[in-house]
């Protein structure tokens, strides 16, 4: 039989593969281009809509930065841009001042720059404005370099609005994509300046001061040096200081710093304290700055001299206003040693510090826009009055600072200085609000930490975390009755002073039964502070609490229920608001003083 003819094996066709690849590439490129155009059209629509809504005109005052830009620990009641606005009487360029605060707590400069960029996409350029920039603590460090992904972002993806935003949101979700170096800090800070100028705004840069004299560096155990070994080194130096031998302590600390590199920053700081005791203030300042710039591993970050040098250079390069807050704070500190006179903790200013910042910002804006300041703050009490910041809010600010100080003492080998500062905050809060449960509890925890291993033992640290006591929570604690009792037992076993134990015990018992005036007061306070969600939770707790046999509570639940209705309405939850109002009217006795008010609201159709 004749053999069948074999089919030839098809040879690869390189030209065909190249055509397919080119077609695919063009298709992908076309899809990306179409997506980019659609995304830009979306933002153009938003810009047109925003411009139409803002035709009346205003002076736009933007704030970019981290928690200091937010005004911690005094926010939301007092913030840097709000203080600046008050200094101009709320008007600039014959327009009302409108504040836009894009502070991002604990975030690097990158999310701050993105927030500003997205806001400026819809900006009405007919409105003049300024951008206050205070950022650096969250990006502190000495690491250099520009990894490949960051190079791609800066040199390629930054040209695409869509891809730039997608990478930003991807980074938020996937932490391994995050890269933070001095080079990335400088790039994004420069970008904030360029975005501001491109949008017709005046950026005002700020160098970043920190509490270098009264806030010691971090000191955490290392693989090659245990906590016990570190304490032994410090105990000998402290003994020299306590005996008035500061000069001998300086020599001792210098020798130990050479022998123990892991302790170099802390020992350099102790040398600064000794120079200060000897009245050698310039040497003290140099040691404090060196200790801060060494960047010891810590529970918080501080901006470095390298960052501040770059901020100054950037202001010169673009000829933009600069508030040199480092020099400003030095000039307003005894002997130029910046410390707790201007700071509430390690890097958040106290109100005296914020006054310096706000007035310096206002002076720079005044010079650029030829507008005089209409007032100056005479001191912290003047600011408290201007913003109706009562004793309860002041106590809450002190609680926030104290809790910050308590938290950064976790695992610290020599935490006494930080805990002493925390204790002072809690005692001041108690002097303002003697029945403040959170202040007394925080004081008890601090005393326990000073007399035990509460902040060094890993099981204790885990216990604090489970109860939410070891995190950067704001102000008041939120604890169940069972948790309060558990904490009280712990405090009793840790040598906490009897006075504190008795006070916390009494307040725990009082928390077990609702006090009408306390519940409704918290509800109203949060509502006044525009914290609607928190206020609603407090009001609903007050509305539904069991007041059986509680003196003076006849109408407390009804008052709280009516406030809950108003908050639900303000939050856009109309149906819930209506049901709450109807329930309030249905259950209210004829003697309730606000019954007619509630009925009027029902008649008006829950307007």
Image (spheres, rainbow, N blue to C red):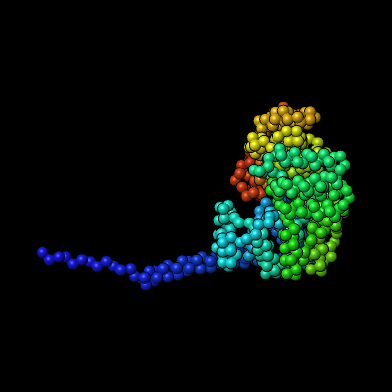
Q: Closest to the observer: 478 or 45? A: 478
Q: Residue at 71%, 37% (x, y): give it.
A: 228
Q: Residue at 60%, 46% (x, y): give it.
A: 575
| Residue 20 visible at all | yes
In the rendered view, does 244 fall on the left or right side of 137?
A: right
At which x and y percent is residue 523?
A: 71, 41
At which x and y percent is residue 234?
A: 77, 41
User: In the displayed structure, would residue 30 be above or below residue 238?
Assistant: below
Considering every residue shown, the one lying at the far left of the view is 1
Q: Closest to the observer: 205 or 578? A: 205
Q: Residue at 84%, 62% (x, y): give it.
A: 373
| Residue 603 visible at all | no
At which x and y percent is residue 452?
A: 73, 33
Dividing the picture into quarters, in which one does residue 329 lie?
A: bottom right
Q: Residue at 71%, 54% (x, y): give it.
A: 137
User: In the displayed structure, would residue 407 be above or below residue 5?
Assistant: above
Q: Closest to the observer: 326 or 441? A: 326
User: In the displayed structure, would residue 82 be above or below residue 10?
Assistant: above
How many numbered marks, from 0 up?
0
In the rendered view, does 90 fall on the left or right side of 244?
A: left
Considering every residue shown, the one lying at the far bottom of the view is 15
Q: Closest to the observer: 265 or 473? A: 265
Considering every residue shown, the one lying at the far right of the view is 279
In the rendered view, does 117 fall on the left or right side of 440?
A: left
Quadrant where the N terminus sits is bottom left
Dividing the picture into quarters, in which one does residue 521 lie?
A: top right
At which x and y percent is residue 95?
A: 76, 65
């Amino acid at each position: 039989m004749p053999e069948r003819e074999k089919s030839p094996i098809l040879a690869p066709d390189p030209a065909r593969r190249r055509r397919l690849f080119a077609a695919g590439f063009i298709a992908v490129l076309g899809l990306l281009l179409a997506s980019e155009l659609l995304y830009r059209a979306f933002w153009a629509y938003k810009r047109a809509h925003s411009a139409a809504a803002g035709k009346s005109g205003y002076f736009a005052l933007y704030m970019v930065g981290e928690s200091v830009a937010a005004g911690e620990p005094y926010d939301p009641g007092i913030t840097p841009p709000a203080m600046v606005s008050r200094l101009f009487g709320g008007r600039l360029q014959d327009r009302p001042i409108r504040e836009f605060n894009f502070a991002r707590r604990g975030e690097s400069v990158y999310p701050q720059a993105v927030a500003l960029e997205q806001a400026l996409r819809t900006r009405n350029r007919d409105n003049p404005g300024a951008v206050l920039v205070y950022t650096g603590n969250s990006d502190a460090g000495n690491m250099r370099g520009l990894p490949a992904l960051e190079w791609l972002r800066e040199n390629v993806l930054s040209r695409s609005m869509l891809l730039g935003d997608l990478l930003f949101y991807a980074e938020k979700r996937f932490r391994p994509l995050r890269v933070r170096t001095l080079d990335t800090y400088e790039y994004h800070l420069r970008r904030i300046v360029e975005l501001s100028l491109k949008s017709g705004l005046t950026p005002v840069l700020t160098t970043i001061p920190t509490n270098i004299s009264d806030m010691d560096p971090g000191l955490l155990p290392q693989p090659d040096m245990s906590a016990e070994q570190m304490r032994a080194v410090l105990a000998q130096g402290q003994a020299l200081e306590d005996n008035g031998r500061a000069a001998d302590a300086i020599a001792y600390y210098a020798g130990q710093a050479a022998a123990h590199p892991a302790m170099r920053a802390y020992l350099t700081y102790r040398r600064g304290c000794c120079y200060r005791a000897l009245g050698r203030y310039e040497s003290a300042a140099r040691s404090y700055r060196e200790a801060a710039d060494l960047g010891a591993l810590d529970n918080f970050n501080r901006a470095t001299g390298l960052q501040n040098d770059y901020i100054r250079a950037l202001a010169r390069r673009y000829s933009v206003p600069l508030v040199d807050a480092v020099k400003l704070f030095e000039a307003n500190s005894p002997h130029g040693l910046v410390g707790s006179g201007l700071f509430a903790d390690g890097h958040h200013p106290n109100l005296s510090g914020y006054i310096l910042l706000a007035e310096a910002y206002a002076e720079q804006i005044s010079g650029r826009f030829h507008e005089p300041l209409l007032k100056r703050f005479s001191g912290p009490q003047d600011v408290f009055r201007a913003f109706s910041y009562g004793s309860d809010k002041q106590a809450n600010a002190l609680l926030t600072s104290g809790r910050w100080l308590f938290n950064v003492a976790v695992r610290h080998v020599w935490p006494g200085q930080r805990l002493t500062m925390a204790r002072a905050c809690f005692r001041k809060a108690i002097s303002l609000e003697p029945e403040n449960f959170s202040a007394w509890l925080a004081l008890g925890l601090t005393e326990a930490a000073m007399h035990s291993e509460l902040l060094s033992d890993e099981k204790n640290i885990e216990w604090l975390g489970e109860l939410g006591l070891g995190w950067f929570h704001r102000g008041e604690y939120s604890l169940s009755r069972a948790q309060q009792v558990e904490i009280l037992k712990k405090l009793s076993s840790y040598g906490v002073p009897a006075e504190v134990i008795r006070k916390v015990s009494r307040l725990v018992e009082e928390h077990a039964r609702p006090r009408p005036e306390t519940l409704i007061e918290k509800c109203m306070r949060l509502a006044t502070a525009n914290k609607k969600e928190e206020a609603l939770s407090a009001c609903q707790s007050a509305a539904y609490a069991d007041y059986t046999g509680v003196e003076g509570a006849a109408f407390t639940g009804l008052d709280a229920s009516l406030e809950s209705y108003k908050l639900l309405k303000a939050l856009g939850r109309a149906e819930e608001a209506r049901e709450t109002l109807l329930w309030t009217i249905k259950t209210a006795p004829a003697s309730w003083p606000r019954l007619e008010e509630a009925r009027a609201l029902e008649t008006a159709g829950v307007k």
